[in-house]
Amino acid sequence: MSFTVLTVCAANVCRSPLMALCLERSFLARGFGGDVDVRSAGVSAAEGDGACPEIARLTKSRGLPWLTLEQHRSRALTDEQIDRADLILTADRALRSEIVKRARPGSIGRTFTLREAAELAEAVSFRVEERTMEGNLRTLTTQLHHSRGFIDLPRVQRLPTRTLPWRRLQVHTHDVPDAHEGARAPHGIVLRLTMPTADRLAATLAHGVLAHLR
């Protein structure tokens, strides 16, 4: 048995495959190995589309295993995927709401945005009592949910772009903005928000679990 993490964005070609790649890499680096199964899907995804070429290029330039994205094929989010996931991480709050609206049993307690989960994880004093890594990860997820509303989280930040046209984007601190819709946040910002956040979340969860198992 393994702990299943499901990352979700809209089309499953940019943000959610990148989130999955970063999380998988971070979990593996902390010795989770086969204990965590990371997958991705999109709420409005077509089946079989390739990953966004720009996000694949950027991951390669950062030394990430970009071939994983080169081989990626999009998948539409299903109720079965929601039901089987132990932790669901969305790219933004609107996507989180889409999942909650499906009213799958227990989904609200397992669904967070990536950045929300990282902030909550760093603020919670975890207490775990299970004897397995998977059981402890499920316990930590429950504690993340129970901490909502009791921890003040930052709301909005202004992020400078590093490519033309230079500007500052106003981004909610729970969100990774979509580079393909609306104001079109640069892909560089998507990467800058996703990589360190995924690593922070994996590091905090690993510390909470491994400190108890030693």
Image (spheres, helix red, strand yellow):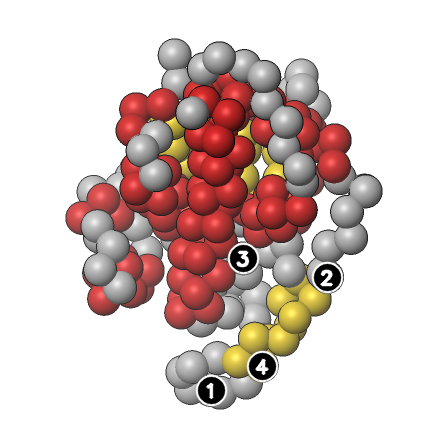
Mark 2 closeness class: few <14, some 14–19, many ≥20 residues within 10 Å: few
Q: CA distance from mark 2 to mark 4?
A: 16 Å
Considering only order in the chain, which callout, 1 or 2, is on the residue closer to the N terminus? Answer: 2
Mark 2 lies on a secondary structure that is loop
Mark 1 lies on a secondary structure that is loop
Image mark for residue 44:
none
Identity of the amino acid at label 1? Pro
Considering only order in the chain, which callout, 1 or 3, is on the residue closer to the N terminus? Answer: 1
Name the residue at 32% across, 56% down. Answer: 52
Considering only order in the chain, which callout, 4 or 2, is on the residue closer to the N terminus? Answer: 2
Q: Position of residue 141 (x, y in %)?
A: 60, 29
What residue is disc 4 on? Answer: 168
Name the residue at 22% across, 52% down. Answer: 66
Between residue 132 and residue 43, name the one nearer to us.
132
What residue is disc 3 on? Answer: 176
Identity of the amino acid at label 4? Arg
Mark 1 closeness class: few <14, some 14–19, many ≥20 residues within 10 Å: few
What residue is disc 2 on? Answer: 155
